[in-house]
Amino acid sequence: MVNKGFMKSWAFSFTALLLTLLITVACGSAAAPETTAPDTSAPGPTAAAGAQPTAVPEAKAEPAEAKVNPGKLTIMVGDLATERFDIGLVGGSPGGANYGRVVHGMLISMNANTEMLPGIAEDWN
């Protein structure tokens, strides 16, 4: 409990004023920096009346070699579903294959036209 003599003294008022000042200064916004507009009264460089620009061919840059990033890959899954990594134990639960699609590679997959696409299996006979 706060001493009642302290509440009535000038120290309480001074402390409250100081805290208010510190909070106001800390939370206040900084003054905007002054900006000066560029001088637009001076005319810029102009081309001669009869001069025409000459086309200069650009040098084609060689394509850079693709680099493989050996860094860390973080994958986020929208929900925890069954929290099982084994696809065989998931069954038909909704969202059950969320982890399986990330952790386990598929041998083959199919597109919207039900055409078989290679996965881990690159070719088959």
Image (tube, rainbow, N blue to C red):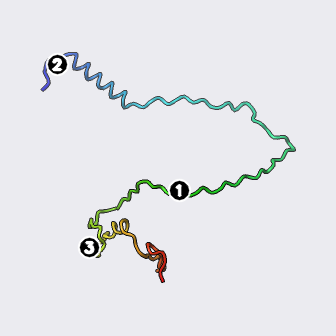
Mark 3 to mark 1 CA distance (whole Å): 38 Å
Q: Mark 2 belongs to which amino acid?
A: Phe
Q: Nearer the viewer, residue 64 or 53?
A: 64
Residue 110 place in picture, x, y as percent: 45, 77
Q: Are marks 3 and 1 in contact (CB under 8 Å)?
A: no
Residue position for label 3: 89
From this view, report whether residue 109 is shown above or below residue 38.
below
Residue position for label 2: 6
Quadrant location of the N terminus in the rendered image: top left
Tell me the crowding category of disc 2: few under 14, some 14 to 19, or many 20 or more residues within 10 angstroms, Cα based. Answer: few
Look at discs 3 and 2 and give the one toward the viewer: 3
Q: Mark 3 belongs to which amino acid?
A: Leu
Q: Earlier in the sequence, mark 3 or mark 2?
A: 2
User: Which residue occupies the extreme right position in the image?
Assistant: 50
Q: In the structure shown, which secondary structural element does the residue marked by tag 3 occupy?
A: helix
Residue 11 place in picture, x, y as percent: 22, 17
Q: In the structure shown, which secondary structural element does the residue marked by tag 2 occupy?
A: helix
Residue 66 place in picture, x, y as percent: 55, 58
Residue position for label 1: 67
